[in-house]
Image (cartoon, rainbow, N blue to C red):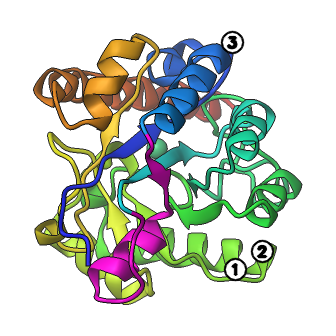
């Protein structure tokens, strides 16, 4: 069983022209291709979140130098730009979808940018990409009461199950953090593991519901990327994450306030 720490990379959008709200956390297709080439050159082998957790529970072994490539929210660029690069290298990945943001029958009309539709999510799954849950409407889960929290987790799980025919096994916390109550609810909903964001590579002792990831941003150069996958230079990365996560939450809140103001005029 591999006990060594494992780098889990967190991406969001892969695109050339992202919206302002998602820009800092998006990566250009060219940078993404260069980063995947480097993973190949370094001899790392991508595995899914379910693979990693299963291994750390004592199940199947991992490759010698595992890495996780994860994408949050469900942006269309993951299908358009990332999937061909992943396929070219034979890499797997995990995509965590906010089901209310995916284009189609469950769409709340509230997504921050152009999102995947369910046919694209199905194509990703068919290509061997793990599809995990990321809540329904992407709230700060610790701010919800118990009923709303359960609804976010269960509704997301049911929609993914209905659309893909397979229940999602893994979850990623919106905004990258959780509370004990949130972690317990995620476990009780049936998710086997959940990913956070943190100042660390993932380690078995973090437990299956608090596996940490490092953020890849638009400003992440190839040298910084190499330090990230080798577990170096992460403190600086984390300082940036906290500011960005907070900034993104503020953008979301401002949009919600504006929408409420618009609705109240009608
Ligand atoms: Zn998210």
- Count of picture labels: 3
Residue corresponding to mark 1:
161
Please tell me whether residue 211 is drawn above or below residue 54 in the rendered image. Answer: above
Quadrant where the C terminus is found in the figure: top right
> In whole angstroms, how far apart are the C-alphas of marks 3 and 1?
31 Å
Please tell me whether residue 65 is drawn above or below residue 157 in the rendered image. Answer: above
Q: Could you tell me if residue 213 is visible in this image? A: yes
Front in this rendered view, residue 10 or 141:
10
Query: Residue 243 location, x and y as percent?
Result: 22, 22
Residue at 51% x, 78% y is 169
Left or right of residue 121, residue 196 in this image: left
Do the residues bearing badges 3 and 1 touch, measured as CB atoms within 8 Å? no
Query: Residue 14 location, x and y as percent?
Result: 63, 27
Q: Quadrant of residue 265?
A: top right
Q: Secondary structure at mark 3?
A: loop
Q: Residues within 10 Å of mark 2 (few under 14, many from 20)?
A: some
Please tell me whether residue 12 is drawn above or below residue 34 in the rendered image. Answer: below
Discs 3/1, front: 3
Q: Secondary structure at mark 1?
A: helix
Q: Secondary structure at mark 2?
A: helix
Q: Which numbered tag is attached to residue 59?
A: none
Among numbered discs 3 and 1, the one appearing first in the sequence: 3
Do the residues bearing badges 2 and 1 touch, measured as CB atoms within 8 Å? yes
> In whole angstroms, how far apart are the C-alphas of marks 2 and 3?
29 Å
Among numbered discs 2 and 3, the one appearing first in the sequence: 3
Residue 44 colored in magenta in the image: yes
Residue corresponding to mark 2:
164
Q: Quadrant of residue 250?
A: top left
Residue corresponding to mark 3:
16
Q: Residues within 10 Å of mark 1 (few under 14, many from 20)?
A: few
Q: Which residues are magenta?
A: 43-63
Front in this rendered view, residue 6 or 185:
6
């Amino acid at each position: 069983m591999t006990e060594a720490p494992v780098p889990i990379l967190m991406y969001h959008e892969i695109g050339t022209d992202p919206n302002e709200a998602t820009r800092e956390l998006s990566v250009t297709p060219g940078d993404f291709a260069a980063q995947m080439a480097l993973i190949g050159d370094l001899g790392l082998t991508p595995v899914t979140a379910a693979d990693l957790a299963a291994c750390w529970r004592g199940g199947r072994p991992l490759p010698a130098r595992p890495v996780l490539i994860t994408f949050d929210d469900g942006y269309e660029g993951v299908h358009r730009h990332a999937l061909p690069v992943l396929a070219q290298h034979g890499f797997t990945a995990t995509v965590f979808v906010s089901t209310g943001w995916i284009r189609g029958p469950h769409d709340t009309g509230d997504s921050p940018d152009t999102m995947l539709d369910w046919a694209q999510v199905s194509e990703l799954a068919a290509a061997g990409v793990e599809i995990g849950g990321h809540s329904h409407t992407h709230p700060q889960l610790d701010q919800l009461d118990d009923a709303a929290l359960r609804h976010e987790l269960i509704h997301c799980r049911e929609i993914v199950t209905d659309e893909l025919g397979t229940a999602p096994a893994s979850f990623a916390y919106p905004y990258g953090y959780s509370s004990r109550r949130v972690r317990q609810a995620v476990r009780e909903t049936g998710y086997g593991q959940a990913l956070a964001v943190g100042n660390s590579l993932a380690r078995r002792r973090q437990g299956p519901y608090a596996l940490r990831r490092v953020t890849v941003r638009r400003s992440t150069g190839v040298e910084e990327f190499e330090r990230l996958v080798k577990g170096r230079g992460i403190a600086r990365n984390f300082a940036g994450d906290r500011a960005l996560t907070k900034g993104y939450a503020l953008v979301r809140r401002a949009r919600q306030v504006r929408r409420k103001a618009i609705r109240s005029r009608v």
